Image: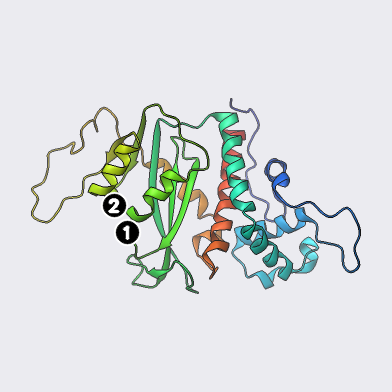
Amino acid sequence: MASSSTKPANVDYFRIPRPLWRQIKRHLPKLPTQRRPGRPPADRRAVITGIWYVLWTGCQWKAVHHSWFGVASSVLHARLQQWQREGRFAAIMTALVRFYHRRQRILWTWQALDARNGAAPLGGEATGKNPTDRAKKGTKLHLLVDGRGAPLSLGVSAANQGETGALKTMVLEMAVRRPTREQHFCGDRGYDAKAVHEFLLQANYILHIKHRRRRGEPSAPEPDIPGEAQYPARRWVVERTFSWLVKRRSIRTRWCKKVANWLALVQFACAHILCDMAIYG
């Protein structure tokens, strides 16, 4: 069910979109009803808006001035870590996947999985030598999407690890349960491995994975995948979703040493993308 609403042309870094706030506020802790001694607790909308600002601008936490949102920068960082430990950002993404499913219906027939290497200058957990950036420290973001490019599952690993290692977790730990009807899996040559094929076939997928030529193997005639001409692989949707994600500077470059904090920001960003796709199509 598509909406006739017009999507805003620009993003307001200082104000979280109202439709997104309506969907996520129930998953944030409520303020205590009884007044306690000391300072009153920070307003949760002000806190999530401060996190929203850091997500988009990629600035340091201490660069956020208290007068902007009425919350100290140390409180913003502390709430991010606290809500991440409590699983609230994962719950927000799951809720937005279900909201998207209610409004638009998940296109299960075609699914695509890919990974993107990004810089992690400060190092930390799940980082390694990036083979695409002169062996500098980097991290890899794995993303599984539906036929429109809506995020269904996330994963993070070191940049020097193969893409196949996170595949099983990505498929088994989707935000919602997969149906049993026919589904097609699209992947590039990085997923052309025997173990991957066996696992996906057991998961009842029809495979559309580009063949990776081995050393000494003769070139195969085109198309090199059975059924490729009838069912062309649709991997471009996951690349488009990556382009949406990296508009947020905190995701384009990972500045969080703790991988869980960075994953929370990615889940928050995916929730925003799902909300827009649910409302505006």
Residue type, mark 2 in image: Gly
Mark 1: few/some/many CA within 10 Å (<14, 14-19, 20+): some
Per the image, the residue denoted by label 1 is: 162
Q: Secondary structure at mark 2?
A: helix
Left or right placement of residue 210 versus residue 281 in this view:
left
Q: Position of residue 58 (x, y in %)?
A: 59, 64
Residue 190 circle label: 2
Note whether 107 is above or below 125 in the view shown.
above
Q: Is residue 192 visible?
A: no
Q: Position of residue 117 (x, y in %)?
A: 40, 60
For the point 64% across and 27% down, the residue is 4
For the point 36% across and 27% down, the residue is 182
Q: Nearer the viewer, residue 4 or 254?
A: 254
Left or right placement of residue 136 versus residue 29 in this view:
left
Note whether 121 is above or below 88 in the view shown.
below
Q: Position of residue 172 (x, y in %)?
A: 43, 44
Circles 1 and 2 in contact, beta carbons < 8 Å: yes
* Quadrant where the image shows the N terminus: top right
Q: How many marks?
A: 2
Q: Position of residue 22 (x, y in %)?
A: 72, 41
Note whether 93 is above or below 81 in the view shown.
above
Q: Secondary structure at mark 1?
A: loop
Residue type, mark 1 in image: Gly
For the point 12% across and 38% down, the residue is 221
